[in-house]
Image: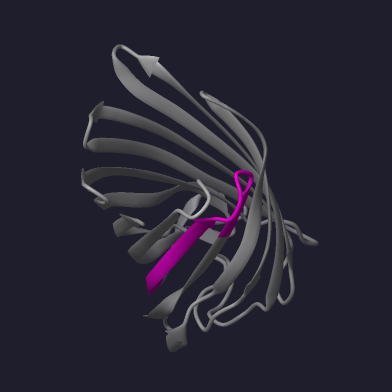
Amino acid sequence: MEPGRTQAIFKYERATADQGYDPNANLVAIDGRRDETLSVFVERGLTPRLTFQAKAGATRGHDRWVSYSGRGPIEAGLRWTAQRDPRSSLAVYLGAGEAGVGRNAGYAAPGKGGLDLEARVLYGRSAPWRGREVFIDVEAARLKRRGLTDETRLDATLGLRPAKAWLVLAQVYAGRAHRDGPDARWVKAEISAARAFGDWSVQAGWRDTVSGRDTARDRGGVLALWRRF
């Protein structure tokens, strides 16, 4: 992010589940649940290499045992660009987060969790393909979690601009919770499209948990509004 520039993403996410993955990765019926989140993610360029980013929001939902409504997770950190050229970049992120009243992990009960410490490495590269701009972003993270088991995450994004104002995104969010006994694992896939209107963009998509172990099969829609300042 260029110094002095800011981007804000306002996002609504709704996920429901009536199936889950057992320890053998088989789908089984579970008690139904619903989770909704309204959040804002902000990043601002501080220097040519340093970017501040933060996230906050509100959440609500219910399952068979509990209903909740209130503050969602709060996150803040700094991203430092170690290397950059016209087609690629390599960055490191260090941040912290405080759990909210809702489901702070897909395999945990609502409200469970505390302070998270996160270290993340990000690599992105773009290139022309058949006259269109294509990019890929890969991120690997390690989370030290209080009140929840530590996690390793791997996220990947493939983006394509079929036209100047349009962006199509295919994303994968994978992770593993480290603990004694069976490990919770998940792979979520998301497909979305965004349309730019000057400094504004509107995004709509769908997310599904396509595989996992000891975790629910959450799926639902994603709506977002982007703004650059």
Q: Position of residue 92 (x, y in %)?
A: 69, 46
x 23%, y 45%: residue = 196
| Above or below, 79 relative to 110 | above
Residue 62 seen anywhere in this rendered image of the structure: no
Quadrant where the C terminus sits is bottom left
Residue 91 seen anywhere in this rendered image of the structure: yes
Q: In which quarter of the image is residue 127?
A: top left
| Above or below, 197 relative to 118 | above
| Above or below, 165 relative to 224 | above
Q: Quadrant of residue 132?
A: top left
Q: Where is residue 172 in the image (x, y as percent from the top left)?
A: 48, 42
Q: What stretch is highlighted in magenta?
A: 32-52
Query: Of residues 98 and 206, which is closer to you in this image?
Result: 98
Left or right: residue 98 versus residue 70 is right
x 28%, y 50%: residue = 205
Query: Of residues 80 and 108, which is closer to you in this image?
Result: 80
Query: Of residues 160 and 201, which is closer to you in this image?
Result: 201
